[in-house]
Amino acid sequence: MLKYVFRRILQMIPVFLGVTLILFMLRIPGLLPGDPIQLIVGERELSPALREQIEEKNHLNEPLYAQYGYYVSGIIQGDLGESYQKGRPVKDILLDKFPNTFRLAFAAILVEIVVGLSAGIISAVKQYSFWDVLVTLSTSILVSVPVFWLGLLLQMLFGIKIKEWTGGAVFLPITGMGSPPDFVHLILPSITLASVSTAYVARIMRSQMLEAMGQDYIRTAMAKGLTERAVVFKHALKNAMIPVVTFVGIDLGVLMGGAILTESVFSWPGIGREIYLAVLQRDWPVVMGGVIVMVLIFMVVNLLVDISYAVLDPRIRYGGAAE
């Protein structure tokens, strides 16, 4: 197992370097709109002496390969640069926003697991019933609906229509996360963020459960007189969970960094919305730092998912001849 983990970490290095190289290329003048030095200066007058000072401080007067070396070295040391607009280290900005994004992503994952697994299991156990048709139809609709459109629809429903029907009462807030943060503000954005993933989890769970329920060991368990509940939850479910764990684990990494649309629609102060605002303001260090954090989270979560396979299925072993 340790050898496998070590090899996987080594495999992450070229991926990480590839991402940093692509991001570094975006810093080359002319590839992105705006003069980075002028963006750093802001409203001040940019004199030749000031330009030279900023170029020297940020190593912009050196060859590209040297600039890339400084860039990667800074990332390894935890230095993601400094925001053009806020004048703060990007690391500090992202650390401030990370708990908010994690709170939203964790809530979305809970919705995804509880609703998606339950719907998939019910759909498989009650195959061709009303519940199976309902789950199939609902998931088909959800995977077709854009996330931002669903968010706007929920905002209109709970922020305008229900308010009109109830004479001004608002049951669910449609923006922000509350001060201090509360559970009620999480409901709409977490449902929106989890909508598409929940549909996929339900579909995967249904197909895997149907496949597991058709295996010989399931028929043997039923022939021994075990209850349907015992057969489903003690035998079929564990073997059907591996693809679901793969999807949910990878999706956690995606949600942690890919909540840009949801956070923007609901004005949720997380990393995704910070990246969105940075793009509008051409604050490229924040954009680049946010992308790097997203990639690192995704790679680490992906590694943890692979390791969890051996826990779910004892037949899977990493390392040695069995691999």
Image (cartoon, rainbow, N blue to C red):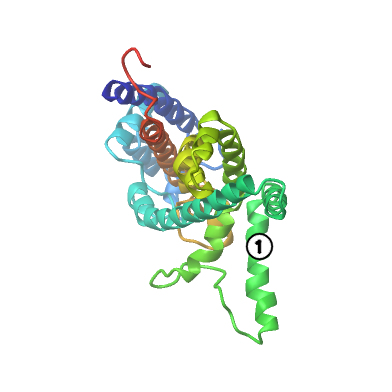
The quarter of the picture where residue 188 lies is bottom right
Closer to the camera in the image, 120 or 195:
120
Instruction: Please tell me whether residue 287 is drawn above or below residue 96 in the rendered image.
Output: above
Instruction: Please tell me whether residue 231 is drawn above or below residue 311 in the rendered image.
Output: below
On the image, the x and y values in percent for residue 298 come to 44, 38
Q: Residue at 46% across / 57% down in the picture?
A: 107
The quarter of the picture where residue 216 lies is top right
On the image, the x and y values in percent for residue 141 come to 71, 51
Q: Quadrant of the C terminus?
A: top left
| Extreme residue in the bottom direction | 167
- Is residue 76 toward the left or the right of residue 192 in the image? left
- Is residue 194 toward the left or the right of residue 301 in the image? right
Q: Which residue is mark 1?
A: 152
On the image, the x and y values in percent for residue 18 come to 45, 25
Q: Is residue 193 visible?
A: yes
* 10 Å crowding of disc 1: few (<14), some (14-19), many (20+): some
Closer to the camera in the image, 143 or 139:
139
* Count of numbered labels shown in the rendering: 1
Closer to the camera in the image, 199 or 117:
117
Q: Residue at 67% across / 49% down in the picture?
A: 139
Q: Quadrant of the N terminus?
A: top left
Q: Is residue 87 visible?
A: no
Secondary structure of the residue carrying tag 1 is helix
The quarter of the picture where residue 20 lies is top left
On the image, the x and y values in percent for residue 268 come to 49, 61
**Label 1 amino acid?**
Leu
